[in-house]
Amino acid sequence: MTFSKKIIFLALYYSFLYYLPASTTPIIGKYCRRLRYNCCKHIFRKCGKNVNIERKAWFGSGVNIIIGDNSGLGINSSIPNDTIIGENVMMGPNCYILQADHAFDATNIPMILQGHSEHKQTIIEDDVWIGTAAIIMSGITIGKGSIVAAGSVVTKDIPACEIWGGVPAKKIRNRFRTEEQIKKHLIAINNIKNI
């Protein structure tokens, strides 16, 4: 796609589609969802099937964003460029994935003048549920089948099939009781992906 076409779709999204009602709104919600999806297919690097971009979801210029099938961005959520979101990912409203942190190491300069740390890519793998108002720091990987509790601040990578919550987020428990159940679930996720 040419740069000028992408700019047109970005302008359409942020000037009009961004404000349309949520996908759950009776009668017109499904049409609003479809309009946002059709627009974002032209903005993102890859946008899978049945993706739900909710109202007021912010994604910057959409550069190098990849979102897999059956995934979505929650109402009023924010993700930076270069974010990868796998398949079957649920994201609640008001979730934020941060692009970078403020630099603060220099002792002779106020923090406000030190700029930012380097941008790190965030990866949300398949079958992840991110609860309402979760904040995910830059450069984090959330493993397949994991759950992030509402209101959590994720500062470390989360392994597959674990439930994390809190500020900062810590492991609460495994999603499944046994290693065998975890393996079965991960195989099932991969099999669904290959259908």
Image: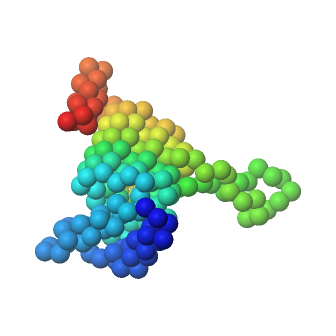
Tell me which residue sits at (23%, 31%) in the image.
191
- Residue 54 figure quarter: bottom left
Question: Which residue of the protein is positioned furthest toward the front in this rendering?
Answer: 2
Residue 123, relative to residue 161: is it above or below?
below
The N terminus appears in which quarter of the rendering? bottom left
Question: Which residue of the protein is positioned furthest toward the left in this rendering?
Answer: 27
Q: Position of residue 116 (x, y in %)?
A: 68, 57
Tell me which residue sits at (27%, 31%) in the image.
190
Q: Position of residue 78 (x, y in %)?
A: 45, 62
Q: Position of residue 17 (x, y in %)?
A: 33, 75
**Display colour scheme:** rainbow
The C terminus appears in which quarter of the rendering? top left
Tell me which residue sits at (26%, 27%) in the image.
187
Q: Is residue 168 visible?
A: no
> Quick one: 21 or 17, which is closer to the camera?
17
Residue 71, relative to residue 30: is it above or below?
above
Query: Along the horizontal axis of the image, is 20 left or right of 115?
Result: left
Q: Position of residue 113 (x, y in %)?
A: 77, 64
Query: Along the horizontal axis of the image, is 181 left or right of 155?
Result: left
